[in-house]
Image: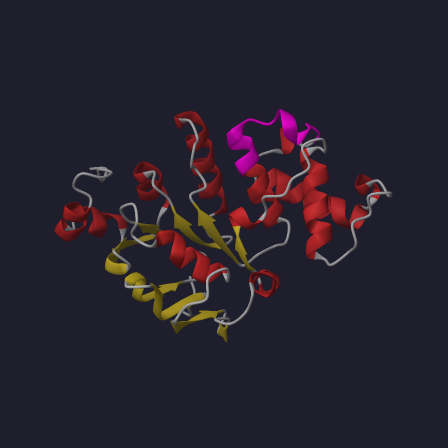
């Protein structure tokens, strides 16, 4: 694994009135690494992800992606450079199939106009990468099923396929298991395990079992500040982290 960071966050600050939502956050992510951000409710995780995706402008600090300062870039320009946020792809066409939706996402990423009057599945240059992304997301057996017929977990897999089709370098995964059953969460854990090493991933997730099963490193955010960062074993043994979680989610032993 390369030692040059894929993502470098330097002293990132975001204030909302007197509230420090992110308090001089410093963090790096290596190519191929899965780095999880955990923390109690209200810790600032969503604000941090928003700043990395480009939806939230920091008050100070910098974000470097692949050695380039992207702090001032909007989400679309970050996505073109390979920094993709999973939830950004929320507009799906329920009456279209899984594959058709992923082809349309590929079409949009390439800057093509939406060819609604030309059957999208006849556009071979778009279908091939879409089929690969659908397979990567674990939906090959559901490729021709209308999105309206998908279960909640499968819709989240579709969102991931619509990001993967653009061949990103880094995935920002904002609570990909939210609202899922235990069985659905297990499938997503297996899916992310299969993607590890192919992409750098920054994962924000409340499911502690999933986090500790997946992460190479974990950073703990409390009141906007990272109070600990390390391997899952180091985080599990950290007394400050355990104290932060008293009365909230329990850390897995």
Horizontal side of residue 29 vs 171, given as left or right: left
Image quarter for residue 48?
bottom left
Q: Is residue 35 visible?
A: no
Which quadrant would the C terminus be assigned to in this image? top left
The secondary structure that dominates the magenta segment is helix
Q: Position of residue 135 (x, y in %)?
A: 62, 38
Q: Relative to 249, is 231 above or below?
A: below
Does 146 sit above or below residue 55?
A: above
**In magenta stretch: residue 221:** no
Q: Quadrant of the N terminus?
A: bottom left
Q: Is residue 133 left or right of residue 248?
A: right
Q: Residue 133 falls in which quadrant of the image?
A: top right
Q: Is residue 173 left or right of residue 138?
A: left
Q: Residue at x 60, y 61 (%)?
A: 76
- Residue 246 drawn at (x, y percent): 16, 41
Relative to 113, 15 lies left or right: left
How many callouts does the rendering have? 0
At 86% from the left edge and 43% from the top edge, which residue is drawn? 118
Q: Position of residue 26 (x, y in %)?
A: 32, 67
Q: Is residue 217 visible?
A: yes
Q: Residue furthest front?
A: 17
The magenta segment: 144-156
At a point 68% along the width and 28% down the height, the residue shown is 146
């Amino acid at each position: 694994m390369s030692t040059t960071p894929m993502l470098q966050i330097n002293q990132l600050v975001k204030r909302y009135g007197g509230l420090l939502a992110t308090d001089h956050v410093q963090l790096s992510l290596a190519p191929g690494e899965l780095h999880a951000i955990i923390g109690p409710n209200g810790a600032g995780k969503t604000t941090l992800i928003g700043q990395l995706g480009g939806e939230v402008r920091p008050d100070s600090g910098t974000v470097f992606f692949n050695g380039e300062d992207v702090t001032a870039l909007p989400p679309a320009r970050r996505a073109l450079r390979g920094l993709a946020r999973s939830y950004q792809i929320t507009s799906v066409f329920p009456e279209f199939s899984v594959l058709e939706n992923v082809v349309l996402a590929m079409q949009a990423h390439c800057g093509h106009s939406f060819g609604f009057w030309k059957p999208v599945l006849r556009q071979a240059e778009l279908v091939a990468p879409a089929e690969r992304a659908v397979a990567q997301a674990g939906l090959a057996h559901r490729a021709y099923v209308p999105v309206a017929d998908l279960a909640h977990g499968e819709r989240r897999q579709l969102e991931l396929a619509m990001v993967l089709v653009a061949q990103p370098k880094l995935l920002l995964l904002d609570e990909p298991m939210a609202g899922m059953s235990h069985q659905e969460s297990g499938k997503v854990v297996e899916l992310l395990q299969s993607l590890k090493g192919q992409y750098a991933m920054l994962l924000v997730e409340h499911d502690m079992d999933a986090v500790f099963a997946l992460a190479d490193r974990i950073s703990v955010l409390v009141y906007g500040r990272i109070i600990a960062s390390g391997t899952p074993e180091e985080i599990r043994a950290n007394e400050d982290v355990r104290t932060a979680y008293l009365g909230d989610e329990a850390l897995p032993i």
